[in-house]
Image: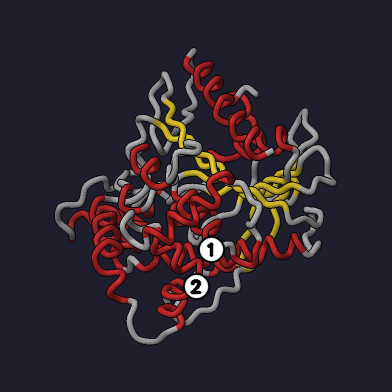
Amino acid sequence: MEYTKTYNELKTIFNIEKKNIPIPNSDINIYNLGFHSEIPLYDFSNKYDALIAENRSFSYPVFSPVNRNSDKVILLLHGLNERSWVKYLVWAYYLAQNTGSYVILFPISFHINRSPSEWKDPRVMINYMKERNSSLSGVNMSSFANVAISNRLTEDPMRFFKSGYETTSDIVKLLTIIRKGEHEIIPKTGKFNIFAYSIGAFLAEIILMGNPENLFSESKLFIFCGGSVFSNMQGSSKLIMDSLAFSRVYNFYLNDFEKTLTGKSPLVEFLRTSQIGMAFRAMIDLGRLKTFRENIFKNIRDQIHSISLVKDLVIPTKGVILTLNTSEKRDIVDSWDFPYTYSHENPFPVFDSSLSKKVDYWFEKVFAEATLFLA
């Protein structure tokens, strides 16, 4: 596949408002399907967030393979603070074409089309950015692209957990519908694999560790640019969150979070006793619930493979290796480097020059590896 050419073609034809999008010169279609989130409100949602209608009812794209009777599904999970599917269209197309799987692009809570449109409008958000920078001192990495999430996480760092919890609940609901044979496009199946990138990998690891409804007992997880515990991430970026927001979230989860798990409430009980809640806590820091985390990873290590990038500053390779390589049987993590300028946020940049051939080549290398593992 010519990545650069296909990226531009899919960017042109994709429209989240269209129900069915045939891909030219291909038997693969994109379907945008509706979903309603039914998360309980009480402790598990910020009361203001519950009023954001876009997060409760939204659509998600599904790439259908050539064989519409396929019983294989890949769930593709994206990165933090994404506001568009454009970056991931070629990824999903390649996986659908080469694994013969249905590929679901499912938005994390308050991301992409699960957020108000103004959150990605530069003309609106630039004013919020100026206001934030003038009222708070020492803010670095501030931009119109990250000011919405920066304000939200600075105000309430528990939103990081709650967004993941809601997304997990939504995924369980969706995959249960598929397993029962009640999905409008995907045939009845229980074969669910995951391709996860960046913070999507953090979420996917927690889901595999928790294995809700036994949906993921046999699932394979391919990780790209992700996989470390939270404490080994560096989330301050103009495309993710500013320095103040990351410092607030980091300090809360590393220093204060465990202290909040006292008393009796549905949230506290969930975090202290459920498999998913314990998995989230274990993925905050290498020393937290260490035995719990390492025992699970040893049991599921053959279900996981990861490609990390040498110049990734957001989720460095060292942290991924420390998290995942829990025995000497097989290294879960491969560390690669690309011979062009890239970043965690943009591993496959679109060049209008001869460099595009190098990007095409390395995209193919990464996704051929993913195909071999997930097919």
Q: Residue furthest left?
A: 137
Would you identify the image quadrant in which residue 302 lies? top right
Quarter the C terminus occupies: top right
Q: Residue type at mark 1? A: Gly
In the rendered structure, are the residues bearing label 2 and label 1 in contact, judged by CB atoms less than 8 Å apart? yes
Whether residue 143 is visible: no
Of the pair 71 and 159, the residue shown nearer to us: 71
**x%, y% of residue 242?**
28, 50
Instruction: Residue lying at the far top in this picture: please name it.
Output: 354
Residue at label 2? 274
For residue 59, the mark is: none
Q: Tell which of 95 and 262 is nearer to you.
A: 262
Residue placed most toward the observer, 122 or 33? 33
Classify 10 Å Cα crowding around label 1: few (below 14), some (14-19), many (20 and above).
many
Does residue 364 appear left or right of residue 103 in this picture? left
From this viewpoint, is residue 122 visible?
yes
The amino acid marked with disc number 2 is Ser
Instruction: Identify the residue position indicated by label 1 in the image.
Output: 210
For the point 30% across and 46% down, which residue is it? Answer: 234
Q: CA distance from mark 2 to mark 1?
A: 8 Å
Q: Residue at x 60, y 66 (%)?
A: 212
